Amino acid sequence: MSGTNQSSVSEFLLLGLSRQPQQQHLLFVFFLSMYLATVLGNLLIILAVSIDSRLHTPMYFFLSNLSFVDICFSSTTVPKMLANHILGTQTISFCGCFTQMYFFHVVDMDNFLLAVMAYDRFVAVCHPLHYTAKMTHQLCALLVAGLWVVANLNVLLHTLLMARLSFCADNAIPHFFCDVTPLLKLSCSDTHLNEVIILSEGALVMITPFLCILASYMHITCTVLRVPSTKGRWKAFSTCGSHLAVVLLFYGTIIAVYFNSVLTEKDTTATVLYTVVTPMLNPFIYSLRNRYLKGALKKVVGR
């Protein structure tokens, strides 16, 4: 692999999800509607947590951070796709592509936040008497700050490795945004090192939070099963239901995207679920059965 970038490509073509004009109009309306719903829903969550003192707890602090990340996550890809449709173009500059890829993966930290939220639920259910002492505001702030540092270091490694590759002739990306795997397929350099890093470091970044979530819920299940009353068990499990639903949705879609070497139409659909649908659904999942959050949302809407 050469030490400097010798690319002859100055821009890339984002082919999107469909090349048929009729479908493109429908996709534009679809993505615009879902993006607006994502921004509005997650923004309401952030405002609700901010103005209601009852929600100034670690669980809702992490939830508001998850909502902020989801807004940024969708904003790195969907606005560019919508702008390309309005302008009638499919191009994105070389620097713009790498910038989009960088920020897409910086805010792609849902897995870390979900792991931290699982630990929060573990402490709340398994050690309720020590919850306030363990989950302090300082610890919560340090955890979130640490997640941002890890996410930046992770994507910086991939970006520096990608910047050393050369792109010669083919510049068509069969996707609606710039991502690592489609770009590697366009490179005319040796991408073996990049592929090894993606598989090893990527698996570590995804599997480690998943194992933390799994361990937390195993302890939670063992603790809840020791509760004598059925009502008590259901109440304990209900505090984790929303988080568990988001975990299943998140990992189900991301496994379909990043653990398949060939980008097929099915994987593209999974990518849409992962990048657009999941961030939109998170506010609805968390507020569906949470009376405190619903009460705070009513206050926000009333104001």
Image (cartoon, rainbow, N blue to C red):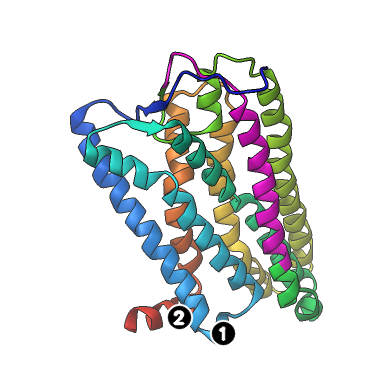
Position above or below: 142 against 14: below
**Residue found 79% across the figure and 67% down from its top:** 226
Magenta stretch: dominant secondary structure: helix
For the residue labelled by badge 1, is the local secondary structure a helix, a strand or a loop? helix
| Direction left: furthest residue | 22
**Residue found 42% across the figure and 34% down from its top:** 269
Residue 186 screen position, x and y as percent: 50, 19
Q: Is the C terminus in the top left, top right, bottom left or bottom right quadrant?
A: bottom left
Residue 22 screen position, x and y as percent: 18, 32
User: Mark 2 or mark 1, which is nearer the start of the sequence?
Assistant: 1
Residue designated by label 1 = 54
Q: Is residue 250 left or right of residue 221?
A: left
**Which is nearer the eye, 188 or 44?**
188
Residue 154 is one of the magenta-drawn residues: yes
| Contact check, label 1 and label 2, Cβ < 8 Å | yes
Q: Is residue 45 left or right of residue 1?
A: left
Q: Is residue 260 left or right of residue 283?
A: right
Residue designated by label 2 = 296
**Residue found 49% across the figure and 83% down from its top:** 51
Which range of residues does the magenta coloring cover? 142-171
Report the amino acid beneath label 2.
Ala
Residue 294 is one of the magenta-drawn residues: no
